[in-house]
Image: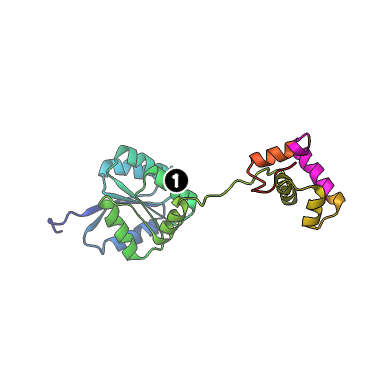
Amino acid sequence: MNDAVPLIRILIADDHASFRSGLRALLGTAGDLEVVGEASTGGDAVAMSARLQPDVVLMDVTMPGGDGIDATKRIVEASPHVAIVVLTMDGGDESVLRALRAGARGYVLKGAQRAELLRAIRAVAAGEAVFGPGVARRLATFFSPPVPSRTMPFPELTEREREILDLLARGRSNAEITAHLGLSPKTVRNHVSNIFSKLQARDRAEAIVMAREAGMGGEGDRAG
């Protein structure tokens, strides 16, 4: 042991003994890491974290005795200085977001390369947050600003009915709508009647007002 380089003390929390053993062996190849304990349940992870005060907990999500997300929340609340890296097979968005809300500083998928895992452990021990490449890409997409979109007015109308209502709002007559859309006069009359009914508009003028207030009609001619 080199006293000049403080070891990063690690608690492994996973319900599979073989995985814990393999992980312990892998971490043992790094000179700056020390596994100080192993927990097989969420409850044990909480209790051992309180007793051992590790620098980093490698936390599985699915375990008996309380899942890893719940255990993460309890550990962070009791010992904020303990950094949690969720190490799991579950890369779903819901699991990632739950882990973040619980206070995890890292999220790495099982099967990650040794270098990636070691980098994550060292980063969270130094106070950083780190996520595996696949998780990071999804987080970037999830938290990116949404693309502005206009809410479609009158969702109760069909696409054709909205098209005809837009033309009504532009001041077009039934005959003009018939010619413009290539429909029969009877079909246009039926669509107009359905529009009035769905919007509960008393007449053409009220439907036009409603459409214009919703932003339809553009800069078309005003109805006479």
Q: Residue 204: say if magenta.
A: yes
Please name the residue that numbered disc 1 is placed on: 98
> Which residue lies at the image location 75% right of the left edge and 37% below the top edge?
205
* Image quarter hosting the N terminus: bottom left
Location of residue 212 in the rendering, given as x and y in whole percent from the top left corner: 66, 41
Indicate the secondary structure of the residue bearing disc 1.
helix
Location of residue 208 in the rendering, given as x and y in whole percent from the top left corner: 72, 40
Is residue 34 visible to the viewer in this orientation of the structure?
yes
> Which residue lies at the image location 25% right of the left edge and 63% below the top edge?
30
In this picture, residue 79 sits left or right of residue 193:
left
Q: Quadrant of residue 211?
A: top right
> Which residue lies at the image location 39% right of the left edge and 43% below the top edge?
102
**Callout 1: few (<14), some (14-19), or many (20+) C-alpha neighbours within 10 Å?**
some
Vertical arrangement, residue 202 with respect to residue 26, above or below: above
Q: Residue furthest left?
A: 4
Residue bounds of the magenta highlight: 188-205
